[in-house]
Image (cartoon, coloured by chain):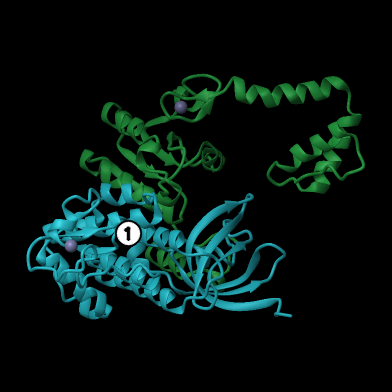
Chain colours: A green, B cyan
Amino acid sequence: MNLDFLPVAKPISKLIEELNKLPGIGPKSAQRLAYHLLQAPAEKSRDLAEAILGIKENLKLCSSCLNITDRDPCSICNDETRDTTKICIVEEPIDIMPLERTKKYRGLYHVLHGVISPSDGIKPEDLHIRELLNRLSSAEVTEVILATNPNLEGEATSMYIQRLIAPLGIRITRLARGLPFGGDLEYADDITLSRALEGRQEM
Amino acid sequence: MPSRVYQTEAIVIKRNKFGEADRLLTLYTPGFGKIRAIAKGAMRPGSKLGGNVELLTYSLLMLARGRNLDIITQAQTIDNFIELKDNLELISCSFYITELIDSFTEENVEDQALFSLLLNTLRDLSTNKESARILRYFEIHLLDHLGYRPQLGKCTGCGRQLQPEVNYFSPSHGGAVCRECGYPDINARILSVNALKVLRYWQQCDNATAAKVKLNHELSKELKSAMREYIKYILEKQLKSIDWLDELNADYRK
Ligand SMILES: [Zn+2]
Ligand SMILES: [Zn+2]
C-alpha cells in the first residue's frame, strides 16, 4: 500500500508501510508500532534491527533434516535422547513447532521446503526428497511419518513419497485425518467426514 | 444495482495463499465463467469453508460482492471427486485439466457448455480412470469450443482430399495435412490412419460413445503428441503441469 498521502514524515510512513507488509499487521497496528518505535530509546531500535538482520545472516539449513538452524546439525538432530529410528516429514520448518509442542513425538524430522504443486511449477525435484532418500538408505530408520498438510498438494506429495520409499520396506504412516477439535459435525466437509469415519477408534 | 449477495455452483480450479489463513480461489462457474474470490480463514482448522472450497471440489457457494474481489460466505460440497483425489495419477491429470481451463479462459466470460465439459471430465476421471482417452477427449472439445477446432476433413495446407495413409497434424495449420504439406513443417507430427479416425470420431461423438474406443500404447502416444503440440502452439507456452504428468506417466495408461 502506498502511504505517501499520510501527513507524516517520509521515514515514518516508510516504516509504517514495511510493518504493514508483515502477516497479521493491519494499517492501524503498523501505525501504533511505528510510533512506539519512534518513542523508544535508540538502542532498542538497534537491537530489533540487528535481530531482524541476524535471522538472515546467521541461519542456515541443517545438513541432515533441513530445518532452519544456527548450528549444524540442528538442536533436534544433535539431541542424543531423540529416537533416531523415526523420521517425520513436514512441508515447512514452521510445521515442526506445533508437533514439538505436543511433546508426543521424540523422533527426528525431515523438512521438504514445499509441496508438489504443478500449477505453480513446483516439481518433486524442487523439494528435498533426494536428501530424504539418502538418509533412509544409510540410517537405521524403521518408521517414516508423513505429516504434510491435509490438502490436495499435501496428499499428492505424501502419495508420491510413499511410492518412492515403499521398496525400502520401511514402515510408512500418515497423520490421522479427521475432525478438528472444537469443530462442528454439521460444517465438516464430506472428505473430512469420510476420512474421520475410516479412522474411527475403539473407545 | 445488482444484489450484494449471490449464489453459484463452482469448481475450484486454483488456490493461492492470500494472507495468513485466507485463500484466493479461482473458480469456474456455469453462469459467470471464470471468477476469483476470497475464502476467508479457509485454512484454519474447523473453518466452515475448509474442505468445501478445497482444490478440485464442486460446490454450491454463497458470495458477497467486494470492492475488488468477491468473498465466499458459505460453501456446500456437491461433489468432491474423492476417488480422483486418492489416486496420484488422476490428481496429476486433473491439475493438467484445470491448468488448461485457466490458461484458455478470461475472467467473467459466461460459458455454460465449457463448465459442463469440465464437470463431466472430472466425473469421468473419478469413475472410469481411463486417463488417456479422457484427457484427449477433453482437449479436442476444449479447443473446438474455444474456436480452435482441429480441422480433420481435407488437407488444411493444400485443400486436397486426405489419402488413407500416414498424414501429419500441423499446429500452425490447425489440423491434418497431407504428406507433401506436412513433411517440410517442422512442428507437424505424424498422424496415422487410425489416429485420424479416432480424432474425427471423438470430435463428433459424446463422452459415453468416446469411451468405446480402446487405445493401444502407440496410438495413445501419437494422439497425445499431436494435441500437445497444437496446444503449445496456440498458448505459446508449455503448461507447467505437463512435466509431472509425464513423470507419473499418467496419460499413458489404457
Ligand atoms: Zn536437523
Ligand atoms: Zn496438402
Ligand 2 visible in quadrant:
bottom left
Q: Is residue A11 toward the left or the right of residue B223 in the image?
A: right
- Amino acid on which disc 1 is placed: Cys
Parent chain of label 1: B
Q: Please say whether residue B254 is visible from this viewpoint.
A: no
Residue A6 placement: quadrant = top right
Q: Position of residue B154 (x, y in %)?
A: 19, 71
Q: Residue at x 25, y 71 (%)?
A: B128
In the image, B40 versus B28, the foreground residue is B28
Q: Position of residue B89 (x, y in %)?
A: 28, 56
Residue A136 placement: quadrant = top left
Q: Residue at x 74, y 24 (%)?
A: A49
Question: In the structure shown, which secondary structural element does the residue marked by tag 1 occupy?
Answer: helix
In the image, B93 versus A84, the foreground residue is B93
In the image, A15 versus A109, the foreground residue is A15
Residue A125 placement: quadrant = top left
Residue at mark 1: B93
